[in-house]
Amino acid sequence: MTDLTQAQVREKIAARLASRHRKEKIFRGFGIASIAFGVLAVVVLFTDIISKGSSAFVQTQIQLEVHYDPAELGIDKVDHESLAWANFDGVIRASLRERFPDVSGRRDKRALYALVSNGAGFELRERLENHPELLGQTETLWFNADDDVDTYVKSLSKSKEGFTGRTDEQQAGWILSLRDSGELEKRFNTTFFTNGDSREPEQAGIRAALVGSLLTLLVTLALSFPIGVAAAIYLEEFAPKNRWTDLIEVNINNLAAVPSIVFGLLGLAIFINFFELPRSAPLVGGLVLTLMTLPTIIISSRASLKSVPPSIREAAMGMGASRMQVVLHHVLPLAMPGMLTGAIIGMAQALGETAPLLMIGMVAFIVDVPHGVTDPSTVLPVQIFLWADSPERAFVERTSAAIMVLLAVLITMNTCAVWLRKKLERRW
């Protein structure tokens, strides 16, 4: 009877072990499936963005032989006033007519002129301003093609017919003629990195938004890091433990979970409506993002201070150091790697925010590159938002390309955070 009971017990134990092992395998399977789903989602996201945005880094350009004809330009000398009234578009049109002499009629000529970007005249003006000796001479230059031509040429590599869109059959014939003669090429799109925003896709760039983002982050870092570290040091090292400090800690933790649009509303009410600071400026954007990132920096800084062993403080105090000397000379240097990591992660979070900046007017159409924190400006996430809302097909690839640039900046910042943590961290 006893042997039979022991056998039953062994069977039960074996059954329980088998059940536990089965549940463990199922749990591991869920974990692996979750990771695989996450990796698959990231791969699909990056594949979609790169496939749509990679083509924006090249731009279709057309080669033209330009004659700086004083009669066509309407000037007899090169100075600032004359260049302001010179007819550079007429010179571009004359070059196109010379390339296609058979084109006649007002409608056909208008279609021919539409092959080249509207910004070609400004490029020509800038070149003549820098090289006044070119007046009366002829040279060969490459100009950006119109966005419809660019879209059609890029689609030709994907299908034989290509996406014609607003390009008619006659224009398609001219484009193929230029391509076959080597006068139309796809070149690296420097305009995308050197220009500000534009209504014309082929002239639109991210430089103004990128500089605006950097200025905004500079203001955010200059304000949030010292304030956040000072608050963390006081709360962790000097503040008495009572209900008031508990209330402050709870509110700091709650602020980290507040939706970012609320900080935008707060910035709109305080900085713009009350203090009357300029709209759409990196200064206001930085102040709003400072409010948003302060809880993150305070929480990470406090965690870094807590990780410093008490023996460091006790040893310093045993040597006669004051409390402030203990904090500034011993605790703070050891906690600084964690604080810097938290600050960089907070900056990366701030760089990707759009909602609070929309509330303070940084959604404005900004063409010029800002030179200071009070100049009108926009930021990269808002620029992406604006381009995504544009109806032109060419803005689709530029939107994805801008997302790629933003992701590259974010990945670089996070890599710096990991590198700093590994480089400066100390183990006890």
Image (tube, rainbow, N blue to C red):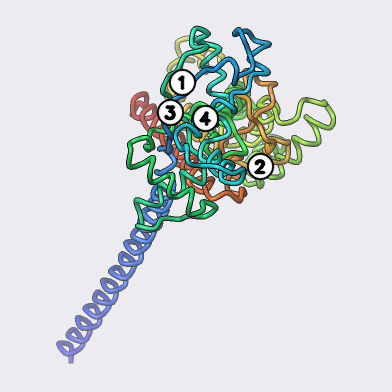
Q: Position of residue 425 (x, y in %)?
A: 37, 27
Disc 3/disc 1 C-alpha distance (Å): 71 Å
Q: Are the two marked residues, 3 and 1, in contact with CB atoms closer than 8 angstroms?
A: no
Q: Which residue is mark 4?
A: 343
* Residue pictured at 68% horizontal, 11% vertical: 81
Q: Which residue is mark 1?
A: 314
Between 51 and 416, the one lying in front of the other is 51
Among the two numbered marks 2 and 1 on one chain, the one whose residue lies closer to the N terminus: 2
Total count of labels:
4
Q: Is residue 256 left or right of residue 187?
A: right
Disc 3/disc 4 C-alpha distance (Å): 45 Å
Amino acid type of the residue tagged 2 in the rendering: Leu
Between 26 and 394, the one lying in front of the other is 394
Q: Are the two marked residues, 2 and 4, in contact with CB atoms closer than 8 angstroms?
A: no
Between 408 and 326, the one lying in front of the other is 408
Among the two numbered marks 3 and 1 on one chain, the one whose residue lies closer to the N terminus: 3
